[in-house]
Image (cartoon, rainbow, N blue to C red):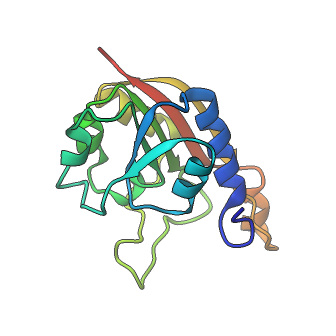
Amino acid sequence: MYEDHFPSRRYQRTLNFIKSTIDPNDRILDLGVENPFTDILRQNGFQVTNTQGEDLDIDTSAVRKSDYDVVTAFQIFEHMVAPFNVLRDIKVNKLVASVPLRLWFAKAYRNDLDSRDRHYHEFEDWQFDWLLEKAGWEIKQSEQFTNPVKKIGIRPLLRKFTPRYYLVYAERIQ
């Protein structure tokens, strides 16, 4: 299942986190277009609908509907200029999100071939927590984990010990 071409370790950690926080009967709106993780969620019994690739900085209409029980957002907020707007506009009461953590030994990710594939933000955990709080969310569960790579060098060694991803389960503050 995706081990050869996709980040299976990150996907497995995320799936385990979702299983510990979300009921499989909950209807999920996943921010972002369909991707390999969408398939993994479906294979594990989750009901997932994805957004259609709209610019969520400008158009938040997809999250202003209450047709879902949970909104998920995996590795998307770092690509947005203003993630506060979409977080504030979400109408459902449950959110599961992951973001990359800022690494002191590496610059923010930037793909020179695709202007959409860049990180406008890389967060420290307290920054993402604050963003969620200001947008009306209370964190109920979170975890950080590393992202080792199969390379030799100082940065690959540091990646074995330095958390790279931050997963959060939050509920809307009433």
Is residue 137 depicted above or below 155 in this figure?
above
Residue 122 pos. (x, y %): 46, 54
- For residue 152, what is the image quadrant? bottom right
Q: Is residue 67 left or right of residue 102?
A: left
- For residue 159, what is the image quadrant? bottom right
Is residue 60 depicted above or below 94 in this figure?
below
User: Looking at this rendering, what residue extends furthest in the top direction?
Assistant: 174
Name the residue located 32 percent from the left edge and 29 percent from the top edge: 92
Name the residue located 18 percent from the left edge and 46 percent from the top edge: 61
Residue 172 pos. (x, y %): 35, 23
Is residue 148 depicted above or below 170 in this figure?
below
Residue 108 pos. (x, y %): 49, 64
Q: Nearer the viewer, residue 80 or 120?
A: 80
Q: How many marks?
A: 0
Name the residue located 52 percent from the left edge and 34 percent from the top edge: 168
Name the residue located 52 percent from the left edge and 38 percent from the top edge: 125
Q: Is residue 99 left or right of residue 88?
A: right
| Quadrant including the C terminus | top left
Residue 127 pos. (x, y %): 43, 38
Q: Nearer the viewer, residue 9 or 123?
A: 9
Is residue 153 depicted above or below 68 in this figure?
below
| Quadrant including the N terminus | bottom right
